[in-house]
């Protein structure tokens, strides 16, 4: 099973010092849940939310697939936005080990 299938099936993967989880955000109580990618960094001991936009799907499954596609683009393009430049840089380097 490749990393994308594992992430969709199990909801998380671990890569280097990072744990990547598919999660839901309901920031505005009247809106539907929005898929998010949460990233835990063992080095800083903190959680981050990937700020790269994830297109909303018509179903939750489609939204999860969109989130995984965004991660794959991050892996290929090296453009993660976790809110902290150093953490984002290290995350891209770790993630790229999956895309080889």
Image: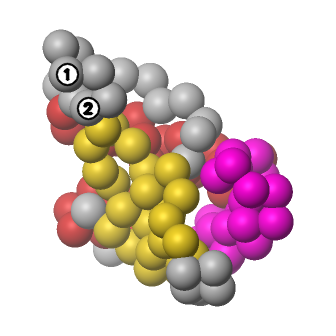
- Does residue 32 sit above or below 47 in this rendering? above
Residue 76 showing in the rendered view: no
Q: Residue, x 53% and y 58% (percent of image)?
A: 48
The magenta span reads: 78-100
Q: Position of residue 14 (x, y in %)?
A: 45, 79
Q: Residue, x 36% and y 22% (percent of image)?
A: 56
Q: Residue, x 63% and y 44% (percent of image)?
A: 73
Q: Is residue 58 left or right of residue 16?
A: left
Q: Are marks 2 and 1 in contact (CB under 8 Å)?
A: yes
Which disc number belongs to residue 29?
Answer: 1
Marks 2 and 1, Cα distance to the nearest angstrom? 6 Å
- Quadrant where the N terminus lies? bottom left
Q: Position of residue 51 (x, y in %)?
A: 59, 40
Residue that extends furthest to the top in the rendered view of this protein: 30
53 part of magenta stretch: no
Circle 2 Cα neighbour tier, 10 Å, few/some/many (<14 / 14–19 / ≥20): few
Q: Position of residue 7 (x, y in %)?
A: 33, 63
Question: Which secondary structure lies at badge 2?
Answer: loop
Quarter of image, res 63: top left
Question: Which secondary structure lies at badge 1?
Answer: loop
Quarter of image, res 53: top right
- Look at mark 2 in the image and give the residue it sits on: 26
- Does residue 32 sit above or below 23 in this rendering? above
Circle 1 Cα neighbour tier, 10 Å, few/some/many (<14 / 14–19 / ≥20): few
């Amino acid at each position: 099973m490749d990393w994308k299938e594992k992430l969709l099936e199990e909801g998380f993967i671990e890569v280097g010092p990072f744990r990547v989880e598919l999660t839901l955000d309901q920031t505005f109580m009247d809106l539907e849940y929005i898929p998010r990618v949460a990233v835990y960094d063992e080095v800083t001991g903190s959680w981050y939310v990937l700020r790269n936009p994830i297109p909303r799907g018509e179903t939750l499954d489609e939204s999860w697939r969109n989130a995984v596609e965004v991660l794959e683009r991050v892996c290929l393009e090296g453009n993660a936005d976790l809110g902290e430049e150093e953490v984002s840089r290290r995350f891209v380097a770790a993630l790229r080990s999956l895309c080889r």
